[in-house]
Amino acid sequence: QVQLVESGGGLVQPGGSLRLSCAASGRIFGIAIMGWYRQAPGKERELVASITSGDTTKYVDSVKGRFTISRDNDKNTVYLQMNSMKPEDTAVYYCNVYALGWYWGQGTQVTVSS
């Protein structure tokens, strides 16, 4: 089993920044893909960003140029730096990793509001 612990969510004003972190622990045999999903009220969960073990990244169009995903393989941790945040970024953000199986974090609330 793999455990994921997320941190960094909270309330931020429009135009502000937040950094999410997700640390993986447990029976890790090489994490191939790490990513972040989000789910806003009344909407489906969507992929925000992902990063492979080779550092190939992918972003949903709505966050390109504003969000940056990165990973520290020594710490089995993935980060999501969110800049120039907008009210439509408000959602529960979930960490997601593939390590011989898909695993999800518990989710962290991000609210963008003045």
Image (spheres, rainbow, N blue to C red):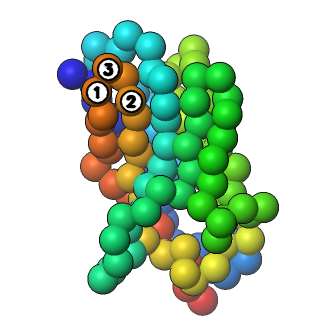
Q: CA distance from mark 3 to mark 2?
A: 6 Å
User: Toward the viewer: 96 or 23?
Assistant: 96
Cα separation, mark 1 vs mark 2, equals 5 Å
Query: Mark 1 touching mark 3, by CB under 8 A?
Result: yes
Circle 2 residues within 10 Å: few <14, some 14–19, many ≥20: some
In the rendered image, residue 58, in percent from the top left (x then y), is placed at: 63, 47
Residue bearing mark 1: 101
- Residue furthest right as drawn: 65
As measured in the structure, the alpha-carbon distance from the residue carrying label 1 to the one carrying label 3 is 4 Å
Residue 100 is marked as 3
Residue at the spot 36% in from the left edge and 64% down from the top edge: 45
Amino acid of disc 1: Gly
Identify which amino acid the numbered label 2 is placed on.
Tyr
Question: Circle 2 is placed at which residue position?
Answer: 98
Badge 3 amino acid: Leu
Residue 89 vs residue 18, the one in the foreground: 89
Q: Nearer the viewer, residue 40 or 12?
A: 40
Quick one: which residue is furthest to the bottom in this view? 114
What residue is rendered at 39% in x and 75% in y? 40
Secondary structure of the residue carrying tag 3 is: loop
Crowd rating for badge 3 (residues with CA inside 10 Å; few <14, some 14–19, many 20+): some
